[in-house]
Amino acid sequence: MSRRATGPATTFRPAVPADHAAIRALVDDTTIPRGYAEARTYVLRLVVEGRAPEARALVAEREGRVVGCVLFGAVAGAVGTGRVQWVTVADDARRSGIATGLCDAAVADLTDTGVRSIVAEMPEDVVFAAGRALLTRCGFTEAARVPDYYRDEVDLVVLQRILAGRDY
């Protein structure tokens, strides 16, 4: 898999074991309030340890350096449903289309496996505004909301992208 983002030559490819330290560094460098980091850390561990076939990662590479990653996969126990867990890009590579390229690459990968619907769950918190904007640009719309899920006045928002041409 090789797709290009805008800017210097950027390729998107499946993560390999040699990428795990770079992925961990990217994810660890992302500023996320403590109460939200557990799910990201859990999925990252599944990807790195290869313990769950439904957890995968793609990386964005520029000039031999991993500058972004997306954690995604199938929803365990669900038929035809995928999930985007996390998208992150190095600070010095942001605003060049890499996050959109990673999201699109994950959607393409999931589509190739027969997924009909892709979900992303996130807190309705200002720290996730850029992530929500990214998912909206990538065709996700709000499908559900659970009020006060994380704490008072911080809802869980479920975004969904239904893939065209897929019947339920």
Image (cartoon, rainbow, N blue to C red):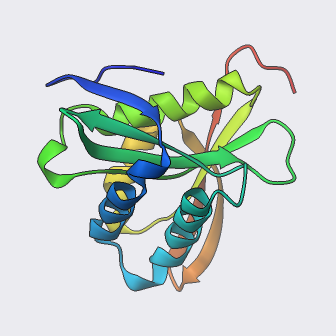
Q: Position of residue 30 (x, y in %)?
A: 30, 66
Q: Can residue 138 be seen by looking at this rendering?
A: no
Q: Give the vertical position of 152 relative to 29 (above or below).
A: below
Lateral position of residue 149 relative to residue 80, left or right: left
Residue name at image x 14 percent, y 25 percent: 8
Residue name at image x 65 percent, y 32 percent: 110
Q: Position of residue 102 (x, y in %)?
A: 41, 35
Residue name at image x 48 percent, y 50 percent: 17
Q: Give the vertical position of 43 relative to 112 (above or below).
A: below
Q: Quadrant of the C terminus?
A: top right
Q: Give the vertical position of 114 relative to 48 (above or below).
A: above
Q: Position of residue 64 (x, y in %)?
A: 23, 36
Quadrant of residue 59 within the rendered picture: top left
Q: Residue furthest top?
A: 165
Residue name at image x 62 percent, y 77 percent: 149
**Looking at this view, is 140 or 99 the one in front?**
99
Q: Give the vertical position of 132 relative to 136 (above or below).
A: below
Quadrant of residue 63 within the rendered picture: top left
Q: Can residue 109 be seen by looking at this rendering?
A: yes
Q: Position of residue 68 (x, y in %)?
A: 32, 45
**Looking at this view, is 89 or 81 the one in front?**
89
Lateral position of residue 101 relative to residue 161, left or right: left
